[in-house]
Structure formats: C-alpha cells, structure tokens
Amino acid sequence: MIAFAPTAVFLLWFCWGVRQDRRQFRNAVLLGLTVLSLSFALLTQVDRLPDNLAVLVYALVFLVPVLAIVVLGCFLVVNGLTMVRKEGRRPANLLSGLAGIGIFAVLALVVTADYLGGSDAYRSFILAVVLITGYVAFLFLCFLAYAFLYGRIRVRGDVDFVVMLGSGLIGGERVPPLLASRLRSGLRVQERQIARGGPAPVLLVSGGQGPDEKLPEAEAMGRWLVAEGADPDLVLEENRSRTTTENLRFSRGLMEAADERYVCVVVTNNFHAFRAAMTARKEGVRGQVIGSPTAAYFWPSATIREFVAVFWEHRIVNGALCVLLAVLAVVVGRGW
C-alpha cells in the first residue's frame, strides 16, 4: 500500500487547498498530481491480476491515450476550420486548429524518430520536444479538469453584488450574444436570490469604452439589463476598466465604498471563469466566479487562449522547468 502514499498526500493537499481558497491554480496542479500518482500506483498492482486482465489494463493505459490524442487532434483541426469560417482569421481564432496540427507534428516526430536515426543532437531535440510537450499537456489537462470542477462548485449564501464583466460591443454600441449570456446569467442570480427571500443584490456592470466603441460597455450592459426588466435603481456601472484585472479592481473599489464587508459573485463566460477567479483572488475581491454558457464551437479556442494566458502568467516557473526538461533531454539523448 506504500505505492498509494503519494496519492494520499496529494489528495489531502488538494482538499486543503480547495478549502482554503478554490481560486488557485495550485489546486489544479495538485488534482493532476493526484490522478497521475494514482495511475502509477495502480500500475504497480497489475502483476497481481490474471494475465488476460493485466493485458486489458495495459491496453487501456497505453493504447486508449494514444487513440484519444489522435481523436483530439482531428477534433481540434476541424474546430479550427469551423472557427475560421464563423469568426474569421484573427490569430485568436486559429488556436484550436494550430493545436491540432501541433499534436500531429509531435506524433510524427515520435513515430519517425527510430527510422530516421540521426545524431545525438537530433535525438535530444526529439526527446526535448516530447518532454516539454508532455509537461504543457499535463498542465493543460490540469487546467481543463479543475476549471470544469470549479464551474460546478455552487456558490452558497446571499451576495450583495453581482458583478458582470464586459466585452466588446457590436457596432460599438450593441451587446453581443457572448456578453448577453453573462448578463442573462447575472440577472438570474439576482432573481433566484429574491425568490428565496433574500435581499436584492446590486447588479454591477463593469466595462470601459474602447477606441472603436461609441459608449462604455457598462452603459450598454446597463441598458440591456433594464430592457430585460432589471430595476434601474439596482444597476451600478463601472465604466473605467479596459482589462479583466481593471474590471475586478475598480469593481472592488465601488463595492468597498458601499459596504466594506460585501460579498459578491462575478459572472463571465464559462471558458473564462477559472482565470477570472484567479485574477479576483489576486485583486482581493471577496467572491467566487460563475460561468455563463458559450457556443460549443467557440469553447475550444477560447479555452486554449485562457490556458495560454495562465501559462504566461507563470512564465518564470514554466520557463525554468522547460529549460530543465531540455537539459535532461540532452543528457538522456546522448545515451539513447
């Protein structure tokens, strides 16, 4: 049973981290380490199984992931084409397609490595690509799994404010479907709290005016909410922010000015919820983040974009680990 000791340690650490503050990326990594250590522990027990069952377990452990990677690559390429067709060729819309192509490129390197042979440098290069790709893939799976889990942890109790994060406007003045989804979800939070007998929370809409916009996003959001039946006296606008960080920072200032002991819930789209929660923690916002629905075809690219942003926020640690993996690849590659 000693093989399961690391799993128990990571699991307890993960549970403690979630209890302390669920808005930490560390929790995502601990969840991944828990699953990874459990998988290794289970593999150490395979020799105790009957031969036919052991073969099945090995097939599931090694064959299924390879097939899943191929299927994922195909899905991402197809999704990339869909994104370009529906959203245009902006760089952000190319992410899922590029990720799919990258998966097949790495697979091709691995498959052809033995056939091409080559120098120590070539073998070290392939090993470095595999190790660094594996590290990034592990972090992405951690991010994906924990973001999914975070989005399903319910926010309990009454709140004083429902903060809705802004986004770009159509034609510089109209609320787009993506933003309307956030506003609709925020309005439902208010309606549900009132329905169960709680005090009506203030709807705090946050978003400044971009260079190509005719009015602040907050103003357009406020108009949309009032048109949908919200009480104008319960709509508060924060119209100076340009980024998610400023959304949360300036909104916190307004909430603290009204009540230093405030509790809020922040609403954004589901693909953005976990990263927004991490930002809210850094900015000292007292509240969790919930996600509103997003079009299925838009979700993969948006999620990859969120992960890239989180990876970049921790660029010093990630860069150092990637360098260490590259050095390890050089050392191992010489004896390959």
Image: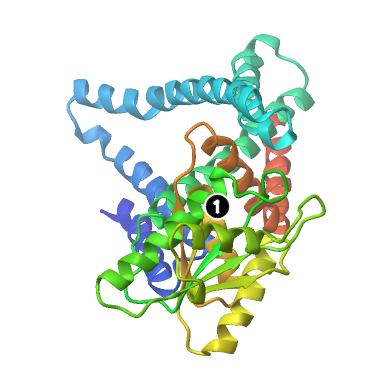
Viewed as shown, does residue 255 lie left or right of 318? left
Q: Is residue 138 above or below residue 124?
A: below
Residue furthest out toward the right: 211
Question: Looking at the image, which residue is at 69% across and 37% down?
Answer: 92
Viewed as shown, does residue 244 lie left or right of 271? right
Total of numbered circles in the picture?
1
Q: Kindly indicate the quadrant of the structure image that contains residue 184.
A: bottom left
Q: Secondary structure at mark 1?
A: helix
Question: Looking at the image, which residue is at 38% across and 48% down?
Answer: 35
Question: Looking at the image, which residue is at 65% across and 17% down?
Answer: 113
Q: Kindly indicate the quadrant of the structure image that contains residue 100.
A: top right
The image shows residue 270 at horizontal and vertical percentages of 48, 50
Q: Is residue 145 above or below residue 256?
A: above
Question: Looking at the image, which residue is at 24% across and 72% down?
Answer: 196
Q: Is residue 258 above or below residue 27?
A: below
Q: Is residue 274 above or below residue 322?
A: below
Residue identified by numbered label 1: 272
The image shows residue 94 at horizontal and vertical percentages of 68, 30
Viewed as shown, does residue 242 lie left or right of 305? right
